[in-house]
Amino acid sequence: MFLIISATAVTVYFLRFFIRRNFSVGDSIVQFLMNMFHMSDREALMIYQYIFLNNIDVITFFVILIFLIILLRFSISWFTKYFDEVIAGVDKLAEESEDEIILSPELDFMEIKLNHIKNNLEKRKKAALDAEQRKNDLVVYLAHDIKTPLTSVIGYLSLLDEAPDMPPEQKAKYVGITLEKAYRLEQLINEFFEITRFNLQTIVLNKEKINLLFMLQQIADEFYPMLTPQGKKVSVHVPEGLTLWGDADKLARVFNNILKNAIVYSFDNSIIDISAGQQDKNMVITFTNQGNPIPQHRLETIFEKFYRLDTARSTNTGGAGLGLAIAKEIVTAHGGTISVESNQENTVFKVLLPL
């Protein structure tokens, strides 16, 4: 563009100079008119004067106009090239091409932005595919697990139906086993509903004043049947009168899920500590248990949907992998955070909620 403007100025200058000052150019034009149109010397000189010398400004204007047209055409071509490159880069985003987007050096800022967007889209796509795969695997596992207690229920009920005179002790044993398998079947079916509810439900909060000590003690008492066979205990250390503003039902679900996770993965005959206190303008609730440490590379993924720490998928203790993910969603909806730290001594889940 600079070269075209410079060339225009130089051309106009020399054109005006040659027409006005350079007599050899004028003589050449006069001689051309005489030879071509058979004019006399005087006629050719008059035409040269009237057409060229008296209209130097008009000629200059047309020369400048021609160069401006060339400049405009060049500029449009120049901008069009860049637009074409950007469009090609956007097409690569739409086509989900694996190739890196490369643009002209002048468009470095756009190239960096497009590649950043491309990387984010690839990460989100991969995360979505991984979550979908984990969900599909989980559904297959649950479907397989449902068959086991269902088969047992049908088998024991068939035995009871076929032998009405069965000894009371044996009948009581079969009824107990059948009831246990039926409870397990109910749990697995509830997990199917949990998966659907978690994907479709929008969290709506109904906030109220909560007595934190009363809530946590009540939750701990509900797990007594689960704690006793393994010799585990829950110790609640919360000052009296400590209150929290939030959705009681949903926060109870958060604490329930965290405590259940702590019970499942703690050592036998160990104590699970629940503590709470005010820190600045936040309420901090911690759940501490002694058990095998969570690997460091899994601390970030433990709150993901359908993530399960026990990759062996224990039938008795394994859930849908939604408990901690749901807890995180509820805490986030309250404007708080949930985190976990784990080492050889203990594992600590920390819930931070604004007062």
Image: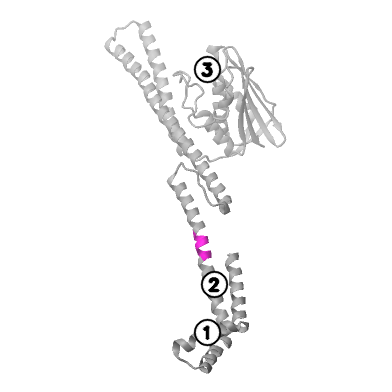
Q: Secondary structure at mark 3?
A: helix
Check the image and report above or below for 281 versus 320.
below
Residue 100 screen position, x and y as percent = 50, 43
> Nearer the N terminus, badge 1 or badge 3?
1
Disc 2: CA contacts within 10 A as few (<14), some (14-19) or many (>=20)? some
> Nearer the N terminus, badge 1 or badge 2?
1
Q: Quadrant of residue 245?
A: top right
Q: Decide: marks 1, 3 in contact (CB < 8 A)?
A: no
Q: Which mark's residue is nearer the viewer, 1 or 2?
A: 1
Residue type marked 1: Ile
Residue 13 screen position, x and y as percent = 62, 76
Residue type marked 2: Phe
Q: Secondary structure at mark 2?
A: helix
Q: Identify the image's colour scheme: rainbow, by chain, secondary structure or one colour.
A: one colour
Q: Is residue 162 magenta?
A: no
Magenta region: 74-80
Looking at this view, is 191 or 3 the one in front? 3
* Residue at 38% over, 6% down: 169
Check the image and report above or below for 164 versus 323.
above
Check the image and report above or below for 30 versus 88.
below
The residue tagged 1 is: 29
Residue at mark 1 to residue at mark 3: CA–CA distance? 113 Å
* Residue at 34% over, 5% down: 167
Mark number for residue 226? 3
Residue type marked 3: Met
Residue 148 screen position, x and y as percent = 36, 18
Q: Quadrant of residue 154?
A: top left
The residue tagged 2 is: 67
Q: Which mark's residue is nearer the viewer, 2 or 3?
A: 2
> Nearer the N terminus, badge 2 or badge 3?
2
Disc 3: CA contacts within 10 A as few (<14), some (14-19) or many (>=20)? some
Please indicate whether residue 158 sits to the left or right of residue 90 in the image. left
